[in-house]
Amino acid sequence: MMSDVKKIAVIGGDGTGPEVTAEAIKVLNSVAKLEGFQFDQTVFDWGGDRLLQTGAALPEDALDQLRTFDAILLGAVGHPEVAPGILERKLLLDLRFGLDQYINLRPVKLFPGVETPLKNKSTEDIDFVVVRENTEDMYCGAGGFMHKGTPHEVATQTAIYTRHGCERCIRYAFEYTMKRNNPKGKRLTLVAKTNVLTIGHDLWWRTFNEVAQEYPEVETDYNHVDACCMWIVKNPEYYDVIVTTNMFGDIITDLSGIIQGGMGVAAGGNINPDPGGVSMFEPMGGSAPKYTGQGVINPIAAINAAGMLLDQIDQPNASQRVMQAIETVTGTKMKSQNAGKMGYSTSEIGDLVCAAL
Ligand code: IPM
Ligand code: MG
């Protein structure tokens, strides 16, 4: 039966990206065998090297090709010979926008054995999810320069928010909160800046409160983004699910990423939850080009991304199994989550996770 074969596009990307995605694929193949389904993986060499050789990070029909897959696994973007900002836009953001992956999902969970910089906070305290809008805001690239390079230069970069854009994100966040079904209580916190962004975030605020009427079981709350940054550090245990705008979401997900142990473990999904939508999962870390080929980078984040991918392609048991195996490995095997200090090589960690499945 065709439906038992899941088609995955693998974009290893730059630097150490291909090394960590290789471990994630290893784990995907192992868990598929155990759960009785199959993967068909296609590897694409898109990224910085391709850009330098051909002038384009992605081929022209990249989106059409990707639309034929069940999901995408992305390694990392960032090449030392490509100016900062180019690959981010020409690969990552073009894919997010082109495939209308309007949700950026960032689970913030401290795995056992992983060190957090927060004093006196444990795995019980750090376990929440950020739902970040992923297609609007200042990320649209709307704006321009006037008198560029002169003392009278003017630069504008406009934050664009639409009812459609914020409503679909807010709805997803409510649905996600229901599905997550936190035993401590279902709570969705809107994070914005309604006291200053009295236009765009007024739209978010009104939409949030309207949609909330349909979810009486979910307790709702609101934080200004600056206050949220304090509370994430002081009382991370307060949060269940956060929903926020693209730009603020970018910032609070790095803050959240470091309290869960940083780049070696944190992962995210760029999700198009609509029927036929193709979602893309990625470890949060960068391409770390100077470590390429040394086998010192932590693949847990990429494996975590693969675990999220499994959930998205309707393999919740396989996803659970991967997440549990990650916890076994971080909790009982690894010395550290930092590159070169794990006590194992990149591929040995992949093997350990496979063994723990
Ligand atoms: C992220 C990253 C990206 C973003 C960059 C690389 C464009 O920081 O996924 O959070 O700003 O969204
Ligand atoms: Mg970011």
Image (cartoon, grey):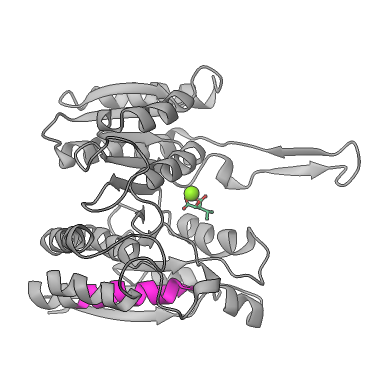
Q: Which residues are magenta?
A: 10-29
Between residues 331 and 137, which one lies in front from this camera angle? 331
Can you see residue 198? Answer: yes
Residue 3 appears in the figure = no
Whether 208 is drawn above or below 350: the answer is: above
Q: Position of residue 242 (x, y in %)?
A: 33, 34
- Judge by depth and name the residue closer to the eye, 291 or 181: 291
Residue at 48% in and 36% down: 248
311 relative to 213, above or below: below
Left/right of residue 139 with respect to residue 170 in the rendered view: right
Q: Main secondary structure of the magenta part?
A: helix
Q: With 13 as the anchor, is 6 left or right in this view? A: left
> Dividing the picture into quarters, in which one does residue 348 lie?
bottom left
Question: Which quadrant is home to the C terminus?
Answer: bottom left
4 lies above or below 111:
below
User: Would residue 47 be found to the left or right of residue 65 on screen?
Assistant: right
Q: Residue 241 appears at what percent x and percent y?
A: 28, 35
Q: With 271 as the anchor, is 321 left or right in this view?
A: left
Viewport quadrant of the N terminus: bottom left
Residue at point 30%, 33% (across, down): 236
Residue 66's place in the image compared with 182, above or below, is below
Residue 247 position within the rendered picture, expressed as x and y whole percent measured from the top left = 51, 40
Q: Quadrant of residue 235?
A: top left
Residue name at image x 26 percent, y 39 percent: 126
Residue 23 drawn in magenta: yes
Residue at x 13% of width, y 75% of height: 37
Residue 218's x, y, as percent?
19, 27
Is residue 236 magenta-colored? no
* Among the 4 quarters of the image, the one containing residue 227: top left
Q: How many marks?
A: 0
